[in-house]
Image: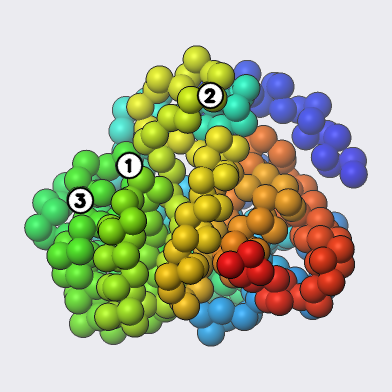
Amino acid sequence: MVIKQLYRAFRPLLFALPPETAHRLVHTGLETVQQTPIEHGFSNQFRVDNDRLQVEEFGQSFDNPIGVAAGFDKNAELPAILGALGFGHVEVGGVTAVSQSGNMRPRMFRLVEDEALINRMGLNNEGADVIGERLSSHRREIDHCGPVGVNIALSESTPTDEAPADYQYTYEQIAEGADYVAVNVSCPNSEGMQDLQQRDSLSRIMDALTNAGAETVLVKLAPELSLSAIEDVIDLVDIFDLDGIITTNTTTERPENLESTKQTERGGLSGAPIEDHATKLVQLVAKRTDVPIIGVGGVSDAAGAYAKIRAGASLVQLYTGLVYQGPTLARDINMGLLQLLEDDGFDSIESAIGADI
């Protein structure tokens, strides 16, 4: 494909820029062509229209199981163009109750030798009021891109004992434009966030969201959780009748086989080095719950996405793979999934979910 070749030629120039600068450049380019004939051309070229890829979850229909993970489109500015690139859903955010600028730069690092990223962005976003209004006002424009989830997180300025009210406020502002809500209590780059994964803290947050009438709520796990902590979260999923689990966030751990000198940077690691662990965690969670799972971590090809699906994920998300593989990735994965289904004798993605459990 010509666009894949162009990206391979352009990538060294893009990678010569600081990662956050390059991301902003790509973001601006995508936003510029959104809602133009170019977007329509992308949709014709990149979307794979095949009933075997469809997934029904959370009361929504997903044209394919491949989505964009939270962090790529923090302020809900790109769902339509990402849908045109072939993704079956987009999760925007993390969104906090108030606007915040995040941590000091530099705060994103490429580990090129490892096809990985480290980020300590700190949940920079425009805040729930602005993002909620944007989602609501653009709802008709983004309907064609598939479901849009919203990842909500704790404001940096909010003490952890006031977290329930903070999450409730954010939910109320974005609810109208969200097809599902992901409760992020696992961001490694925001002070105090991971403490919220404790059973009592998470229970109070879910109480507040339940009282607010929250619907289609998922919780996002950190990869470092112990088995007992995972089981506590699963218990709460059952108690509050939550709709799903997202497995997993970035990790503060550093695998021994990392090659890049950037590995010592503080922040959450994503990309190829965490892929196997993330897939194993999907399988572990899937064995312990019947709720749908969104598998995240290191996916950059059809084989990786398929492994998470067979491990129990109904849907798969990626971010770092898009940085390294370029804009054809969703199409490449979806075409590859069709071949893998054919090879294994499955008539649909839904038939393959949990095949390795």
**Residue under numbered circle 3:** 195
- Distance from the alpha carbon under mark 3 to that under mark 2: 28 Å
Which one is closest to the eye, mark 1 or mark 2? Answer: 2
Left or right: where 150 falls relative to 40 = left
Q: Can residue 157 be spotted in the picture?
A: yes
Residue closer to the observer: 85 or 287: 287
Q: In this view, does 146 lie above or below 23?
A: below
For the residues bearing labels 1 and 2, Cβ distance under 8 angstroms:
no
Distance (Cα) linking label 1 and label 3:
10 Å
Label 3: few (<14), some or many (≥20) within 10 Å? few
Check disc 2 and report its element: helix, strand or loop.
Answer: loop
Q: Residue 188 carries which label?
A: 1
Query: Which of disc 2 and disc 1 is earlier in sequence?
Result: 1
Q: What residue type is labelled 2?
A: Leu
Place of residue 325 in the rendered image (x, y in percent of width and height, measured from the top left): 71, 39
Q: Residue at x 54, y 18 (%)?
A: 260
Q: Looking at numbered disc 1 in the image, what kind of residue is underneath it?
A: Pro
